[in-house]
Amino acid sequence: MIVETNSRDETFEFGKSLGEQAKKGEVYCLSGDLGTGKTVFTQGFARGLEITEPVNSPTFTIVSEYEEGRLPLYHFDVYRIEDIEEMEEIGYEDYFYGEGVCLIEWAELIKELLPETYVSITIEKNTAKGFDYRKITVTNGELKDI
């Protein structure tokens, strides 16, 4: 599925619609360059899970936990992972195979740890189509795709 958005609000709303459909145990891998709207998308996704607390990029922590919604959201940013053992130290399997939903930024850096199936979301900018234009591609991924 490919969705084109033309504003921050549209990107948020699309994230929200996916969050409303999310199910326990699902893993979402979120890709996109800096400034493409990953945080806005994630904020919408969290709202779709009925999470009302502020959601920010977990840039300086590996995982941020949001427990108050319809399902818990575990928002990972693994950009700064230096060694896969860091993921093992935080008990990633409890998150990936637990009671909540995982959204992982920069998942390609930990591809050997990902479950066999996941949802891949790629956000791209194209300033020729407008400053706020985003192309969001959603696919059911498999390990060979990353």
Image: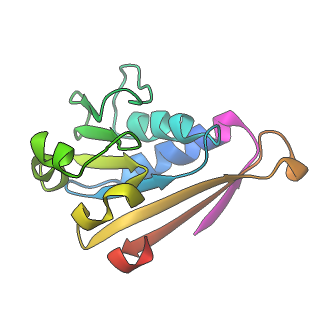
The single residue placed furthest to the right in the displayed view is 128
Q: Position of residue 106 (x, y in %)?
A: 43, 51
Image-quadrant location for residue 59: top left
Q: Position of residue 66 (x, y in %)?
A: 26, 29
Rendered position, 13 above or below 1: above
Please check the rendered image and state whether residue 68 is part of the magenta-colored stretch, yes or no.
no
Q: Position of residue 135 (x, y in %)?
A: 69, 57
Q: Does residue 109 appear to the left or right of 115 in the view shown? A: right
**Magenta stretch, residue numbers:** 1-10
**What residue is shown at x 23% (from left), y 41% (from top)?**
71
- Viewer-nearest residue: 49 or 98: 98
- Viewer-nearest residue: 4 or 85: 85
Q: Does residue 8 appear to the left or right of 55 in the view shown? A: right
The single residue placed furthest to the bottom in the displayed view is 144
- Viewer-nearest residue: 18 or 97: 97
**What residue is shown at x 32% (from left), y 43% (from top)?**
81
The single residue placed furthest to the top in the displayed view is 54
**What residue is shown at x 36% (from left), y 49% (from top)?**
104
Image-quadrant location for residue 117: bottom left
> Is residue 115 visible from the viewing direction of this image?
yes
Q: Position of residue 123 (x, y in %)?
A: 60, 53
**What residue is shown at x 35% (from left), y 76% (from top)?**
142
